[in-house]
Amino acid sequence: MKNLKNRIKNQLLEHSRGKLFKVIESKYYYSMYQDVFFVGTYDECVDFIVNGRRHDLEIQPFGGGNDENEIVDEGVSKIDDKIEFDYETNDQDSNINTRLGITSKNFKFKPRFKTLPKSGVKVLSVYQKTSNKETTEIIKDLKRSEEERGVSENDYNSFLTRTAIFYGRVLKDMEIDTIFLMESKSSLSKDLTVKIKSILPNTTIKLLDNSIVKDIKNIKLNREGAKLSDYEYELLGNIHNNVKTKGEFSLKKIHPKHRALFTDWIKINEDSIRDVTDKNIIVVDDYITSGVTLDEVCTQLLKLSPKSILCLTIIK
């Protein structure tokens, strides 16, 4: 009998190997995702419960509940200088919102995708803006240093965990070799990427920071096919000339409809080329506005012949 039990246990473990599970409080059997304590393989989840001596926790498959009709509508708002999560409704009172669950008969979770116009690369975003002003305030708070951040460390980590789990539902079955982080003064993208990497089954994913850099010495202004007035033509020409003479370039100072005309101002570090060619690439940025910067990055990466590219942003 003991040998039979061991065989059954080993078969179950073999079946679950490589699959992800979540640890939740048993009293929240149909829990929303704020109750997730840990995500990992079945063995890792067992170790988490045993080591923590938490007998009130249980293990469920990651990426779906027991109820096939489970829908999770969630939002993020800023109220009285504090970021708050709304786990049950996804309404216009939430400044950022998302949805997990069934969106049609064929999808349990339909992510938010945008296709970049020049490179054709897809961008996956978790949250949707509903108020640009308030959303900007939330992002500013999250991007500040720990000392200046307008949210508690607990709220910050909760936001990262929730967002990483949303990404994990899409990424856990994908082949990923390299994750590139966009250059940023904030640690938000890096903190999130480390969290995402920690819940994915593949432990050999390479994380590269500061490998995508601004390099304006070869910047070009492609006006061919653009419908420009004489004034716009002269203005853009002056901006291009100033970049060459003063060595300064800020995409934010250029009108969104003209940003895509400036190309070849992004460089991939030479020592990172081997992590691009014939590799499955993820590029992570905190949010997307016009998408021009990500498009330029992907255009440069495509020149190095990757196997695939997908971009991740927190907010669309």
Image: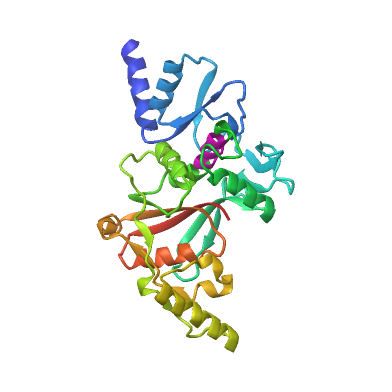
Q: Depth check: 247 or 15 in front?
A: 247
Write the start and end of the magenta stretch as one range: 156-165
Q: Can you name the residue that lies furthest to the top here?
A: 1
Q: Is residue 207 visible?
A: yes
If the image is split into quadrants, where does the N terminus sit?
Answer: top left
Write the residue at 37% across / 38% down. 201
Q: How many marks?
A: 0
Q: Depth check: 146 or 24 in front?
A: 146
Q: Is residue 101 visible?
A: no
- Residue 42 horizontal/vertical position (percent): 41, 27
Q: Can you name the residue that lies furthest to the bottom here?
A: 230
Write the residue at 55% across / 34% down. 158
Q: Is most of the magenta stretch helix, strand or loop? A: helix
Q: Depth check: 301 or 106 in front?
A: 301
Assess whether residue 160 is covered by the magenta stretch. Answer: yes
Assess whether residue 311 is covered by the magenta stretch. Answer: no
Write the residue at 50% across / 58% down. 123
In this rendering, the answer to whether 127 lies above or below 266 is: above
**Residue 69 position by quadrant:** top right
**With 54 as the anchor, is 273 left or right in this view?**
left
Write the residue at 36% across / 15% down. 5
- Residue 222 horizontal/vertical position (percent): 45, 81
In this rendering, the answer to whether 38 lies above or below 180 is: above
- Residue 211 horizontal/vertical position (percent): 34, 55
If the image is split into quadrants, where does the C terminus sit?
Answer: bottom right
